[in-house]
Amino acid sequence: MFVLTSILPIITLALAAPSANDNCRPSRTTYVAQYDDLPFVEPGPNPIPPHYNGLSYTAFQVDQYDGFILPTSGNQWTMAFGGSGNFSGPASPAKQTFQLESFSYACVAGIPQPECAISIWGWKDTGKIVKRVITFPRLDPGHVIEDFKMNKTSFAREWRDLKSVGFSIARADDGGDVFGGLALDDVKYTITTKC
Ligand SMILES: *[C@@H]1O[C@H](CO)[C@@H](O)[C@H](O)[C@H]1NC(C)=O
Ligand SMILES: *[C@@H]1O[C@H](CO)[C@@H](O)[C@H](O)[C@H]1NC(C)=O
């Protein structure tokens, strides 16, 4: 009994004090998040599990094709039903960041829907913020469903060293509410860990 009580505190101390670099391996990995491998049940919610392909999502869920706009790959995409949401890398290791490269996107409010302005913010590890606004065209009645497609965009090199990316949609004409969701698919990014 005397032996146990005197050894335990020593073990605890040894576990609590690894040097910071022991957990860090320099790496660089490119992902294309397609969401097709994630479970989807109805009724939801269908949150994206933490650290999915290295990122964690706020407000975005797994969503499945329902006969309207077809996801770019497979039959699932990620949807922020309220039109705004984020994805972020982990706070630790501090020197892990990602570069956003490209994705497919659609505003999904039904037919008709107004031209949709999607504001995108990137928060860098330095605290610097980069911003971009892209649009998804207005959708009018009188089309076959196949006319409605996701659009795709890619990002310049300034969208690197990111800790987090945030999205918010609004009507392009007057800044009002779109009353719809923002869908993303094939989100491509590279996660870099420096030590
Ligand atoms: C996105 O992240 C920012 C900064 O962390 C936070 O202020 C904002 O509330 C988040 N938005 C959503 C929709 O989670
Ligand atoms: C963008 O989306 C619109 C509306 O769905 C579609 O008509 C158009 O073909 C898409 N453009 C591209 C380049 O995918």
Image (cartoon, grey):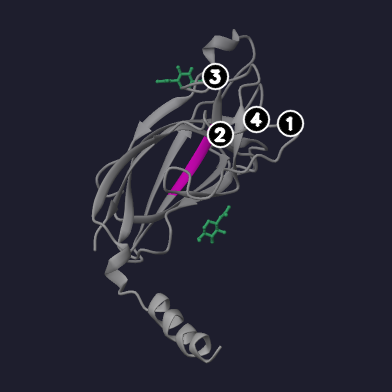
Q: Main secondary structure of the magenta part?
A: strand
Mark found first going from the N terminus, 4 or 1: 1
- Looking at the rendered structure, the kind of residue marked 1 is Glu
- Looking at the rendered structure, the kind of residue marked 2 is Leu
Tell me the SS state at disc 4. loop
The answer to whether residue 131 is left or right of residue 50 is: left
The answer to whether residue 22 is left or right of residue 73 is: left
Gap between marks 3 and 4 measured at Cα: 14 Å
Magenta-colored span: 115-120
Observer-nearest of 131 and 127: 127
Tell me the SS state at disc 2. loop
Circles 3 and 4: CB atoms closer than 8 Å: no
Indicate yes or no: mark 3 CB to ligand 2 under 8 Å.
no
Q: Residues within 10 Å of mark 2 (few under 14, many from 20)?
A: some
- Tag 1 residue: 42
Number of numbered discs on residues: 4
- Tag 4 residue: 109
**Ligand 1 rendered quadrant:** bottom right
The percent position of residue 138, horizontal first and vertical second, equals: 55, 25
Circles 4 and 1: CB atoms closer than 8 Å: no
Which quarter of the picture shows residue 17?
bottom left
Residue shown at 50% from the left, 21% from the top: 74
72 lies above or below 33: above
Q: Residues within 10 Å of mark 3 (few under 14, many from 20)?
A: some
Gap between marks 4 and 1 measured at Cα: 20 Å
Residue shown at 49% from the left, 40% from the top: 118
Q: Residues within 10 Å of mark 4 (few under 14, many from 20)?
A: some
4 lies above or below 96: below
Residue shown at 27% from the left, 42% from the top: 156
Tell me the SS state at disc 1. loop
